[in-house]
């Protein structure tokens, strides 16, 4: 049985990925952020049988000693641990360098020493900045429009440098905007859903015009799993996107239709990015994922997006889930 480590396993994508890997028959060690409460984040909420089957390692990705211990005995490492909130990166950029760049370096150094067979490094579509052409393929220029995206570009380049310099078997997966159950309300889809589910009709958001390529969580984690398994893709950077774009305003309209609620979206100034930091358009070319991984989005196009939204809304409106979210607060 293949032993894998998932960093950031307590988060949104990480917890879904743990479930996917266990169901595929892998032995999973889950790296979660240490805290004094013993909380495992979203892993506390997954299927109890899956939860009991995984090994927990509590630590901090910024600590190289803990990272090395966590990686010992693992053939594959899927590195998702990161700070991802763009507004918070304006507030505390130092922490993004420490976590996203130094944390990735810790993974790479340990992988080199321990001779790990495959490292999956997680990038983000934010590294492209506003699209200079569409659809965006992996050759698109990188443009850091926020401290967050700058930190991820740095981490991506570190990962590739270890492949080039030391033949470290790194694959960089670059997901476009993933959505689904368990996502933080910092993201636009949960922001709208949680307000609507609490009876708000004038929903507070940031800019209405940016477009994004939204990828349902099930498609994203399936892509990660394939990147960990398919041979001959070391050194590659691979987009995971649905090849379908939709604006914030259109998302609001769809959520209103699905929920049967008459809502309007209201731009709130504190939620708007600085003008030169706003990424206006992200639209993925997923050809490489289709060709190298034999991956395709099962929730693609407008019909797939609507289906993914329906499943996401169904999860969020469950009172047991909705109570975890403070819809009245803007959390950077």
Image (spheres, rainbow, N blue to C red):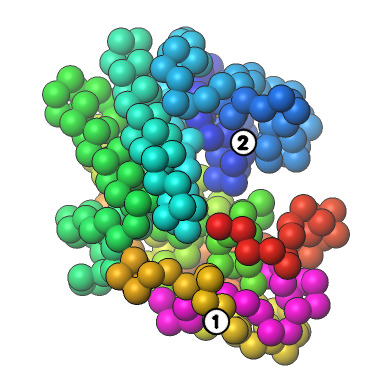
Secondary element type, mark 1? strand
Q: Distance between the residues labelled 2 and 1?
A: 31 Å
Quarter occupied by residue 245: bottom left
Does 109 appear in magenta?
no
Of circles 2 and 1, which is in front? 1
Label pair 2/1, CB-CB below 8 angstroms? no
Q: Mark 1 points at which residue?
A: 267
Decide which of tag 2 and tag 1 comes sooner along the chain.
Answer: 2
Residue 51, percent across and down? 72, 29
Residue depicted at x 26% and y 41%: 154
Could you say which disc has been placed on residue 10 in the image?
2
Residue depicted at x 52% and y 25%: 60
Residue depicted at x 21% and y 26%: 162
Above or below for 263 versus 207:
below
Quarter occupied by residue 198: bottom right
Quarter occupied by residue 330: bottom right
Residue depicted at x 59% and y 46%: 12
Q: What stretch is highlighted in magenta?
A: 193-210
Residue 196, percent across and down? 73, 75
Could you say which disc has been placed on residue 210 in the image?
none
Kindly tell me whether residue 292 is visible in this rendering: no
Crowd around label 2: few <14 · some 14–19 · many ≥20 (10 Å)? many
Residue 165, percent across and down? 14, 24
Kindly tell me whether residue 214 is visible in this rendering: yes
Residue 98 vs residue 234, the one in the foreground: 98
Crowd around label 1: few <14 · some 14–19 · many ≥20 (10 Å)? some
Q: List the single residue furthest toward the right.
A: 319
Above or below for 301 versus 234:
below
């Amino acid at each position: 049985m293949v032993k894998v480590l998932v960093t950031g396993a307590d988060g949104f994508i990480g917890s879904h990925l743990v479930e996917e890997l266990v169901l595929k028959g892998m032995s999973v060690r889950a790296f979660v952020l240490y805290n004094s409460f013993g909380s495992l984040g979203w892993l506390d909420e997954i299927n109890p049988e899956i939860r009991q089957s995984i090994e927990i390692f509590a630590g901090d990705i910024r600590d190289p000693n803990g990272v090395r211990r966590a990686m010992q005995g693992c053939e594959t490492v899927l590195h998702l641990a990161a700070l991802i909130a763009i507004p918070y990166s304006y507030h505390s950029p130092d922490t993004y360098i420490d976590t996203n760049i130094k944390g990735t370096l810790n993974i790479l150094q340990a992988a080199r020493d321990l001779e790990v067979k495959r490292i999956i490094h997680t990038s983000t579509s934010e590294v492209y900045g506003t699209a200079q052409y569409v659809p965006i393929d992996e050759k698109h220029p990188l443009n850091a429009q926020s401290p967050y995206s700058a930190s991820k570009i740095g981490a991506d380049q570190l990962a590739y440098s270890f492949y080039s310099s030391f033949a470290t078997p790194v694959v960089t997966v670059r997901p476009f905007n993933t959505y689904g159950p368990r996502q933080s309300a910092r993201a636009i889809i949960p922001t709208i859903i949680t307000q609507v589910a609490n009876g708000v009709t004038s929903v507070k958001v940031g800019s209405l015009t940016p477009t994004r390529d939204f990828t349902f969580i099930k498609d994203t984690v399936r892509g990660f799993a394939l990147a960990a398994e398919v041979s001959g893709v070391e050194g590659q950077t691979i987009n995971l996107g649905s090849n379908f774009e939709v604006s914030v305003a259109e998302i609001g309209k769809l959520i209103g239709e699905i929920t049967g609620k008459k809502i309007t979206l209201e731009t709130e100034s504190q939620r708007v990015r600085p003008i030169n930091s706003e990424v206006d358009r992200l639209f993925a070319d997923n050809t490489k994922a289709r060709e190298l991984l034999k991956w395709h989005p099962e929730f693609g196009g407008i019909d797939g997006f609507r289906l993914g939204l329906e499943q996401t809304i169904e999860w969020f409106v469950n009172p047991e889930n909705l109570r975890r979210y403070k819809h009245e607060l803007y959390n950077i």
